[in-house]
Each structure stands twice: as structure tokens, then as C-alpha cells.
Amino acid sequence: MKKLFLFLFLAMPIYAQLTFVAPYIGAGVSYFSPSSTGLNKFAEAYNAQRATILTKKMEGPSMTPGFSITGAFGLLGPFIDLTYSKYTGIMSAELDPTKTAGGGTGRDINLSMNALNMGVGLAFQSGPGVIIPSVYFGGYFTDFKTKVKGTNTKEAEDDFSAFTVGVGATLMIPLSNVVGVYVNPIYNFTFMETDFYRLYDKTSTNYNLLSDETKGGFGGFQINAGILIGATCLN
């Protein structure tokens, strides 16, 4: 115990010279461009099994810009941030109603995605701001609802999750002692494959139960930008 107090006493002059760049909280807009072999494989299987009735093939998800909330703690040096992001998106196909049972005109798969990313990095002063290259660990939790358009069939819903690792950086520029702006691009990819079998089940898309054909990667490019409160103005 005496050695611990001695270490803290000797470290105080060094600690006093460190520049805090956090804690802070921030909020702003967020954009996510997914890159998923798993979702692409699902779309290919869906299209192949309906080739004779499709008028527009299903493709990978189209995402709309969302919002993000971020918080962080760190110095010029070790730095940790945690960011929550929310997105919506859609995957859709069009069908020839004269060739479908019940006159269905297409299928929409509406996606609601909640993402959580934790970054661990090092902060460096760069001109008037701070740049923080980081390694990220994330989770993407997606609820989906799907229905055949033009029919009275009940809407089906379920979910899937993907866990990712990634690399990115945060650029922070203080505007005053308590307010700043930030930009945070991240590229994520899965370290283990995600199973999308629930998408197959809810859309009546066949697959081999003994194979891994419903599994695939999930990741993509994400960028967050906004205003932060609590940043210390750097000299």
C-alpha cells in the first residue's frame, strides 16, 4: 500500500501536465453503407427461387442516414469512446401479380438497425484539434419486418445480430472550452459469420438445413459527425 501511494505521489506532476480531451458527450448525424456477403447471398437465393415471377430483383439493403450519440473519456494518449447509432433501411423486390398466388406485387423487408461501437485508441494533437486513431468493437442489432405487397398476408417480423471489429479515427476540433465538432469514420467487418436463417424463414426462401449457406459476413463503412460538449480547448 505504501508503494502505491508513493507511485501516485511521484506521478502527480506528470499527470498534472496531461491535457484532457474528454470526457465529452456528442450527438449528430450518422451514415452506414453495409457490406454483407450474408445479405447478398440471401438476395441471390431469393431471386433464384423466384426467377420466373420477378420483375425487379432483390438487392442488398439500401440504408437511410440516421443519428448517433457518442461519449468518451481520455487524455492526449489513451482514449476510449462509445457510440450508439440508429439506422433504417429496406430490401425490396417486385413481382408479376399475374404469376403469383394471391396477386402479390412484391416484397419489402424493412430494417431497423441499432449499432453500438466501442473504440480504444490514442489521441494526438494535430493543429487546433485532436485526431484519435482507434480499434473498434461493435454490435449491430437489426429488427426486420416483411410482407408480400398487394395481399392480405400478415406481416412477419424477427431479428438478427452481427458482431464486428474495425478500424477508424475521430477528428475533434474545439470551438470553445466546452463545445466542439467531431467527425468519426469507421470500417467494420465480422470476426465470425452471422447466420441470417431467420430472413430465409420469414420470406419462405428455401435452404439446406445441413449447410452453412445462410451464414455470411457483415460489416461496412460508417461515418458519424456532430457537435460535442465537454471538450477541453487545447493550447
Image: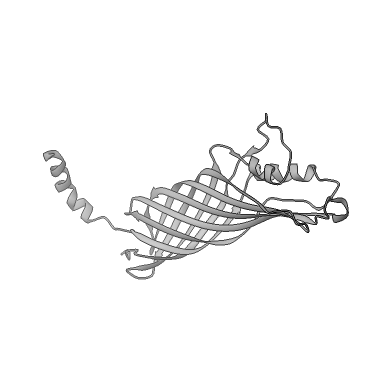
Residue at the limit of the structure toward the top, as seen here: 210
| Left or right for 164, reference 147 | left
| Left or right for 156, reference 174 | right
Q: Quadrant of residue 189?
A: top right
What residue do we see at 68% from left, 46% from top? 202
Residue at the limit of the structure toward the bottom, as seen here: 176
Q: Position of residue 89 (x, y in %)?
A: 63, 57
Q: Position of residue 209 (x, y in %)?
A: 68, 32
Q: How many marks?
A: 0
**Which of these two is toward me, 51 or 20?**
51
What is the image's colouring? Answer: one colour
Q: Position of residue 100 (x, y in %)?
A: 84, 51
| Left or right for 200, reference 181 | right
What residue do we see at 30% from left, 58% from top? 20
What residue do we see at 37% from left, 53% from top? 123
Q: Position of residue 17 (x, y in %)?
A: 23, 56
- Which quadrant would the N terminus be assigned to in this image? top left
**Which of these two is toward me, 32 or 155?**
155
Residue at the limit of the structure toward the left, as seen here: 2
- Which quadrant would the C terminus be assigned to in this image? bottom left
